[in-house]
Amino acid sequence: MKLHERIDGRLRDFIQAQAMFFVATAPSGPEGHVNLSPKGMGGTFVVLGEHRVAYLDYHGSGAETIAHLKDNGRITLMFCAFQGPPNIVRLHGRGRAVLLTDPEHAELVALFPEAPDRHGVRSVIDVDVHRISDSCGYSVPLMTYAGDRDLLLKWSERKTDADLAAYRRAKNEVSIDGLPAFS
């Protein structure tokens, strides 16, 4: 494992070339569930600086990341090379969820010019990165990228703003451990 002082050119290029990444968060204390979510879709992740990254958070069946960030801010993002030379990059940091009801939301969403659609975005996850590491990735399998799925985008396209607000009330008010997300 190697520690890096910043997200520099080589690391930035590697991170931005990955079609998917993983997000891990957990509630405070010994109880509660650790959450690990795969993320993807081209144009939905950006490196904003040497110690800052962000991604678009679309509506989903849960809101664990948002709830955990409200609780304690801890977050880790992991990028694996499924093609080319083996590599794993982890970004540890403090994050915040900028909800679509926040005045800063539109300003942050504008930082994603290549996002496929912004209608279904419920928050922007903004991460202040304080630890950057990479490791070998020798056991990560080689896999071929066939393309992004469009099911989430098609689902949100069929929803009005009112439909999405009702969905958040029904599915995203609290985490599976009862922590507030959109409540």
Image (tube, helix red, strand yellow):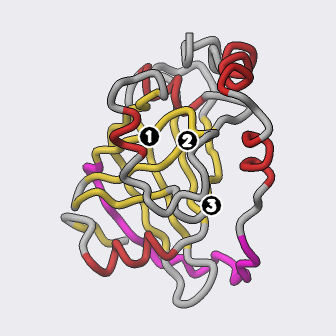
Element carrying mark 1: strand
Q: Amino acid at mark 1?
A: Ile
Q: Amino acid at mark 3?
A: Met
Element carrying mark 2: strand
Q: CA distance from mark 1 to mark 2?
A: 7 Å
Q: Mark 3 or mark 2, which is nearer the start of the sequence?
A: 3
Q: Is residue 124 left or right of residue 59?
A: left
Q: Is residue 7 left or right of residue 33?
A: left
- Farthest residue toward the left? 5
Where is mark 3, residue-wise?
41
Q: Is residue 128 left or right of residue 74?
A: left
Q: Answer yes or no: do the residues labelled 1 and 2 have beta carbons within 8 Å?
A: yes
Which portion, as a residue range, is magenta?
Answer: 129-147
Quarter-wise, where is residue 175 in the image? top right
Where is mark 2, residue-wise?
57
Question: Percent position (x, y) of residue 142?
Answer: 69, 83
Q: Mark 2 or mark 1, which is nearer the start of the sequence?
A: 2
Quarter-wise, where is residue 167 in the image? top right
Where is mark 1, residue-wise?
125
Residue 137 magenta:
yes
Residue shown at 62% from the left, 44% from the top:
36
